[in-house]
Image: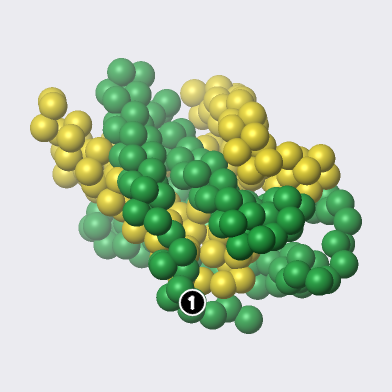
Amino acid sequence: MLEESLFRFLIGGLVVSTFATLGDLFKPKNFAGLFGSAPSVALATLGLAVSVEGPGYAATETRSMTAGAIAFLVYTSCVCWVMRRYEWSALGATTALVPVWFGTAFGLWYIFLK
Amino acid sequence: MVRLDPSGWKETKWHEYAVRFLFGGIITLAAGIIAKIYGPGVGGLFLAFPAILPASATLIETHVRKEGGSVRKARDTASLDVAGAAQGSVGLLSFAVIVWYLIRTHHAYFVLGGSALAWFAVAVGVWRIMGSKDHKAAAGPGQPHPGPRTQV
């Protein structure tokens, strides 16, 4: 269990930081921002899920991931709007609006996918 | 015009790479633990959690301030990064749908690789349609501020 957790942590850290580093290489900034929505956590998790639990388990996870992705769109749109309209700091807007992601993701999951 | 700028690597400090690694590792670990406790239905939601967006946007804002940019310019630049992530999220949705439909019937690792390519293609496509407008609106220093924008 501990070994699997450590492996998951290392793979996740590696994949996520690789995509983030790729984003640093591109200009303009809004193109680089595309890498902020890379399926990095998904690739790390699903790769492990397929090998340990099988493809059926991964399919169930990605079914729910569709709700998470829609929530990501809603969350980032809200963050962007609040930063521009009310001039909130990046840290303030991105952390204060995390409940928008939770509300949208779990709301969609409960209504359509549960 | 999209261009490669290797100097972006030099601007990022080691502790900033470490923060991203840490966030990525923690979210991946948390997604796995949540899936084990509550099942893959709930755990799957966290595959699209905005894991490093707060860290990335904050780093960009800090870099612009250190380069002498105003608070407003720093926030505008960070908001461009967030707008890019919003456009890319359509690609993220495509990734999820493709894996969901194909992973049971095709070779899993080919599906994951192909879906990652689809994410990139869709994200770039959406960026080409919407992103260039946003970029022009937030042109470099010395340009008049475009004012509040309510669209991503």
Q: Residue at x 66, y 61 (%)?
A: B68
Q: Residue at x 29, y 33 (%)?
A: B29
Q: Is residue B45 above or below residue B83?
A: above
Q: Is residue B1 above or below residue B26?
A: below
Q: Where's residue B101, x and y in %? A: 41, 50
Which amino acid, by three-letter code, is at mark 1?
Asp
Q: Is residue A99 above or below residue B122?
A: above
Using the rendered view, name the quadrant where residue B108 is placed.
bottom left
* Chain with yellow colouring: A
Q: Where's residue B95, x and y in %? A: 45, 54
The quadrant of the image that shows the C terminus of chain B is bottom right
The answer to whether any part of residue A75 appears in the image is no
Q: Residue at x 17, y 44 (%)?
A: A51
Q: Is residue A107 above or below residue B55?
A: above
Q: Is residue A52 left or right of residue A35?
A: left
Residue identifier under label 1: B5
Q: How many badges with numbers are in the image?
A: 1
Q: Secondary structure at mark 1?
A: loop
Q: Is residue B79 left or right of residue B7?
A: right
Which residue sits furthest top?
A: B37
Q: Label 1: chain?
A: B
Residue count near mark 1 (Cα–Cα under 10 Å), binned few <14, some 14–19, many ≥20: few
The quadrant of the image that shows the N terminus of chain B is bottom right
* Chain with green colouring: B
Q: Where's residue B39, x and y in %? A: 33, 23
